[in-house]
Amino acid sequence: MGMKITQTIVESQIKYGILDILKEAQPYFSRSYVSVRVHVFFDDESSPKAINLTGWKNDTPMLTGLTEWYKKNSAAVGDKVIIEVLGNNSYRLSIRKWRGIVSPIERQEKASRSEEHELFDYRDAAAVLEEKGLLSEVNRILSEIDKADHTKIQELFRRNGWETGKRILPQTTWAWDAYKDRVVMSLEFSLVDAVHRDFFRLLMWHQDKKVDAVLYITTTFREPKFENVRRDLEILRSKYSSLLPVLIYLVGLKH
């Protein structure tokens, strides 16, 4: 049995039949500035298929030609791809379906805490932020927040190249607080009902294929409290997993 690396499937991969090779897995793939063929065993198949490894020239390596395999496995956003490294440019790919249930260890990892804020990762949004190169940027911005001031926080994101006041629908005045590279940032310091309203609006954008992940910022000390939003997400994840397929990185400011 070889090295195994787990990645989370995002919408663009299903749409284009590709698998982006993230930083953790890249050392196990041959680097070439032209497309090369690698041997892939799909699921429990005993014979490999030759597929293309491309994208190194732009530092975005990926496997292509996976559309039929995704269809066969009914792949969905949030599912896991397990890459098993077999050696000699050979790999085994399998999919682990997202079930909406996590182990205590996974729950602890996804609900990690820091001195300045609490975090909860709904459906592995952090993996998408990391893939886009935004996770470190988000963490840096969070470290610069000294209080839950809507205007000041929005300005911090604007200075880092995020579009603020992103209109949700042309026929309404609804807007996201910030938006960058198909990631929505929303601040909510009022009512938990407003959070549920945002979930509804996110479903619209998900159906319109405009969003890959969401950074949702609230506080631990006033409505809607972090613990209440996390509770609602955990209920959705464990009992109604298909209702909210959007990936959400929830942050609870402590000051």
Image (cartoon, rainbow, N blue to C red):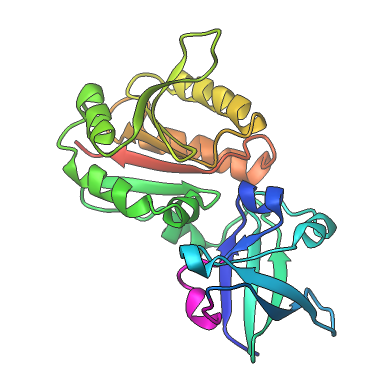
Q: Could you say which quadrant of the image residue 73 lies in?
A: bottom right
Which residue is found at the position 44% from the left and 50% from the top? 129
The location of residue 163, given as percent across then percent down, is: 36, 29
Query: Seen in the image, is 90 located left or right of residue 69?
Result: left
The location of residue 194, given as percent across then percent down, is: 45, 19
Query: Seen in the image, is 93 located left or right of residue 183?
Result: right
Which residue is found at the position 61% from the left and 28% from the top? 203
The N terminus - image quarter:
bottom right
In magenta, the rendered stretch is 21-32
Q: Is residue 24 magenta?
A: yes
The C terminus - image quarter:
top left
How many labels, in total? 0
Residue 184 against residue 32 in the figure, above or below:
above
The location of residue 22, given as percent across then percent down, is: 50, 66
Q: Residue furthest left?
A: 146
Which residue is found at the position 64% from the left and 29% from the top? 208
Query: Seen in the image, is 177 located left or right of residue 181?
Result: left
In the image, 135 versus 115, the foreground residue is: 135
Residue 149 against residue 12 in the figure, above or below:
above
Prevailing secondary structure class for the magenta stretch in the rendered image: loop
Query: Seen in the image, is 154 located left or right of residue 44?
Result: left
Residue 112 against residue 48 in the figure, above or below:
above
The location of residue 213, given as percent across then percent down, is: 50, 42
Q: Residue furthest front?
A: 34
In the image, 14 versus 238, the foreground residue is: 14
Which residue is found at the position 51% from the left and 69% from the top? 56
